[in-house]
Image (tube, rainbow, N blue to C red):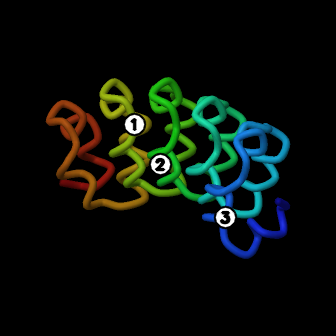
C-alpha cells in the first residue's frame, strides 16, 4: 500500500491496513494530497488537531469526520468555517453560538444567517445588513 494509490483515489485509504490508517506521518501526507483521506484515518487520528487542521484548511466539510473534541475546538472550527461556512453545521453547540465563528461562516455564505440561533443572529445582524 502506498501514497501513490491514495493520490489516484482517496477512498483507497479506507482499504489500507489499520497500522497505516493509524500512522500519523502517513495519514498527514495522505490528507495533504486529498483532504477526503481524513474520513478514512483511524478514530484516534480523527482526534489529532494537526491532522484535522490540515484537512479543514482544504475542505471545511472535513470537520464532519473530526472527533467531538475537535468539533469543540475553537481553532479547528474557525479554520473550517473560513474555508466553508457550512462547516458550522458540524461544530459543537457552544461554538455554533460563538460570534466570531458565526460571523466567519456568514461571510462565506450569507444564507447561513437564517439557521443561526436568534441571539447570534441579533449580534451579527450588521454583517449581513438584515
Please tell me which of labels 3 and 2 falls first in the chain.
Answer: 3
Indicate left or right for 13 with 19 as reference: left
Q: Position of residue 45 (x, y in %)?
A: 66, 34
Percent across and percent down for residue 49 are 66, 31
Q: Nearer the viewer, residue 16 or 113?
A: 16
Say which of marks 2 and 1 sits in front: 1
Q: 8 or 83, which lies in front?
A: 8
Identify whether 79 is placed above or below 34. Answer: above
Cα distance, mark 1 to mark 3?
Answer: 27 Å
Q: Does residue 51 appear to the left or right of 121 in the view shown?
A: right
Query: Which residue is labeled 3 in the image?
Result: 12
**Crowding at mark 3 (Cα within 10 Å: few <14, some 14-19, many 20+):** some
Q: Name above or below for residue 75 compared with residue 62.
A: above
What residue appears at the point 39 percent right and 36 percent down from the top-left corner?
A: 91
Residue at image mark 2: 81
Is 125 in front, or is 90?
90
State if disc 3 and disc 1 touch (CB < 8 Å).
no
Q: Are marks 2 and 1 in contact (CB under 8 Å)?
A: yes
Asked which secondary structure carries label 2, the reply is helix
What is the C-alpha distance between the residues marked 3 and 2?
27 Å
**Vertical position of residue 75 compared to residue 65: above or below:** above
Q: Is residue 67 left or right of residue 5?
A: left
Disc sitting over residue 91 in the figure: 1
Which tag, 2 or 1, sits closer to the chain's start?
2
- Residue 50, image quadrant: top right
User: Disc 2 to disc 1, how far (Cα)?
Assistant: 9 Å
Q: Residue furthest left?
A: 118
Amino acid at each position: 500500500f502506498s501514497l501513490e494509490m491514495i493520490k489516484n483515489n482517496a477512498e483507497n485509504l479506507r482499504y489500507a491496513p489499520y497500522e497505516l490508517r493509524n500512522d500519523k506521518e502517513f495519514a498527514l501526507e495522505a490528507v495533504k494530497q486529498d483532504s477526503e483521506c481524513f474520513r478514512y484515518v483511524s478514530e484516534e487520528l480523527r482526534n489529532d488537531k494537526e491532522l484535522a487542521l490540515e484537512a479543514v484548511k482544504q475542505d471545511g466539510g472535513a470537520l464532519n469526520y473530526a472527533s467531538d473534541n475537535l468539533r469543540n475546538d475553537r481553532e479547528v472550527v474557525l479554520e473550517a468555517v473560513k474555508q466553508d461556512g457550512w462547516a458550522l453545521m458540524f461544530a459543537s453547540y457552544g461554538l455554533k453560538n460563538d460570534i466570531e465563528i458565526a460571523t466567519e461562516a456568514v461571510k462565506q455564505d450569507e444564507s447561513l444567517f437564517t439557521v443561526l440561533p436568534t441571539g447570534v443572529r441579533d449580534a451579527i445582524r450588521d454583517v449581513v445588513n438584515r
